[in-house]
Each structure stands twice: as C-alpha cells, then as structure tokens.
Amino acid sequence: MNDPAVNIQGVTHRYGTHRALDDIALQVAPGTLYGLLGPNGSGKTTLFRILSTLMPPSEGTAQVFGLDTTHQPDAVRQRIGVVFQDEALDETLTVRENLRFQGSLYGLHGAARRNRIDTLLERLDVADRGHDTVDDLSGGLRRRADLARGLLHRPDLLLLDEPTAGLDPAARRTFWTAVQRLQAAEGTTLLVATHLMDEAERCDRVGILSDGALVADGAPEALKADLGTETIWVDTESPTLLRNRIEAQFGVPTRIVGATVQVAPSNPPAFLPSLYEALGDRIRSATLRPPTLEDVFMVHAGVSPDDDREHALARAARMQD
C-alpha cells in the first residue's frame, strides 16, 4: 500500500501560550491538488513550516511519503519543493542563473540540469525571459520563475504558501494554468495555502482551517452539497431574530451564515413568496441560489477568509507581551 503524500496525526503547535495548531489530523493522497483554505492567522503557514522541516510540532507527527519531518528531515527535504509567499530568488541574477544555483544545491549539473531548466521554463512560458535578471520581471513572471525553482529537483510534494499574493487577476490565472499543466505532466502532489475562493475551487480537495483547527475537509463540490442544493439566502439586520421567527412560524431548517440566514425549505421557489409575505419587514433582500465555497467557509469558520483583522490584532498583542 502506498504511503500518503502527507500524513498528519494529532499535530498541535504552540507559540508560548498561543495554540497555532490544534490537534490536526489530515491525509493527502499522492497526485492530489489539496487546498488549505483560511484567513491569515488560521495556522496555514505554521503547518507549512512543520511539513517543510523548519520546525517540529509541539505534539503529534507529520510525515511526507512515510518520512517523519522531525526525525528524518534530510530525507523529507529531498522529496519536497517549497514556493514561499515571497519568491526565493536573487534579483541581481538572471532566471537561468538562479535555477542553475538551485540545481547545484540538489546535485544537478551539466546536461541534466540544463535540460531540466529548459523543460520547466518552456512549460511555464518563461523561456524567452530566461536570460533577464529577476529584477526586470513582472510579478507574474517572477512567481512562475520561482515555481520553476521549487520544481527543479522533481519533488514529489510541492508546498505553495499563498503563491499568488500580490498578483493581479490575469497573472493569477496564468500562474494557475501553469501549475495545473505541470501537475498533469509530472504527477506532483500539490499542497496550496490560500484564502482565495477561486483558487480553492481549483483543488481536488479542500481543508478549512479556523483558529488552528481543521473544521472541514472534502472535495469542493461535496462540501457545497452538504449545505443543500438551491436554497434561500436572506440578508437582514437581525439574523438571529429572523432565524428564530422562520423556525417558529414555518418549521423549516435555517442556518446563520455570517450576516445572512440560509433557509432550506423543501420547495424554495414556492416558499419564497410566503417568506416575504410573513416577514418582509425583516428582510433587506433574499436570493435563491446554490451554496458557494465561501458559504461553506462561513458555516464552518464563522468568518470570511478575508477577515483577518482580529487575528492580526491578536498577534500584535502577543508580540507586546
């Protein structure tokens, strides 16, 4: 039986008294594009630091293809590549010079290294800029050059930590097209940390992190289907009051999702006029639609993936202690 690409069991990590990860259990099958979805401060980067052998967990175990990240770090590093939030490229060197240096770190030399660089630059549409210095590249080109760096030694697992941060939408789409084309060509397992819904939608599976806990895990379509098919989403000033009124008067399932109320009657189109007739004074707007991945996130995490203000304030307070 093949080992999982990632096997995390009971991983907890603390920074002083702050628990950044809380009893995480997660398995990722080889060849999977897996997305870790969560706001800043949810624990994504801490988990990546553990998987990339930069630090051991406070409790529990993390394995990459059966290799323990704490006790077998050198072996793990041979199996992984990492693309950080900020590219790990020397801006004064050309793209090819950066890749030649990276290749030498992994024992790649001569024709084998040159052929691998040529292949990656061609697949990532950077071949015509290989002799340009990194400082002369746009943000999107730099990210693709850094992706080539992370893939140069043919890692079995590639960790992508917020890889499109700061890119415009067009550059993000180009980056993801390149990633998925490479995954299809090389069969690399990809673990992506993101807070962007469109990136999470591209993944085979998604894990939702909230305050260090893994609160949901599954295929995006399955996670959305768990909330129902087509349901009513009501915008109101008093979600709790409206939910209580709907449940008391109609007895249909309801759920508060952020500042909205999801109503799931057996026949939503037929129910909507009755809802307006009975409680229209409490309704700002109502929409009939399928659940989105952002709805899933709100249900399980209670906040929007972009809502990281409280996490930032908490980190600042801890730094001042």
Image: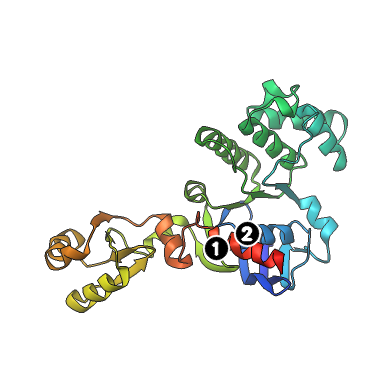
Towards the viewer: 192 or 156? 192
Which of the pair 108/15 is nearer the observer?
15
The residue lying at 24 percent from left, 58 percent from top is 284
Taking the image as shown, residue 75 lies to the left or right of residue 39, namely right
Residue beneath disc 1: 310
Query: In which quadrant will I find the C terminus?
Result: bottom right
- Judged left or right of residue 24, residue 226 is left
Above or below: residue 292 compared with residue 7: above
Relative depth, front residue between 223 and 93? 93
| Percent x, y of residue 95 | 75, 29
**Residue 232, percent across and down?**
26, 60
Question: In what element is the residue under mark 1?
Answer: helix
Label 1 amino acid?
Glu
Marks 1 and 2 in Cβ contact (< 8 Å): no
Residue 251 is labelled as none
Q: Residues within 10 Å of mark 2 (few under 14, many from 20)?
A: many
If you read the primary sequence from the N terminus, does the residue marked by circle 1 or circle 2 appear first? 2
Q: CA distance from mark 1 to mark 2?
A: 16 Å
x and y percentages locating residue 205 in the rendered image: 52, 56
| Mark 1 neighbour class, 10 Å CA radius: few under 14, some 14 to 19, many 20 or more | few
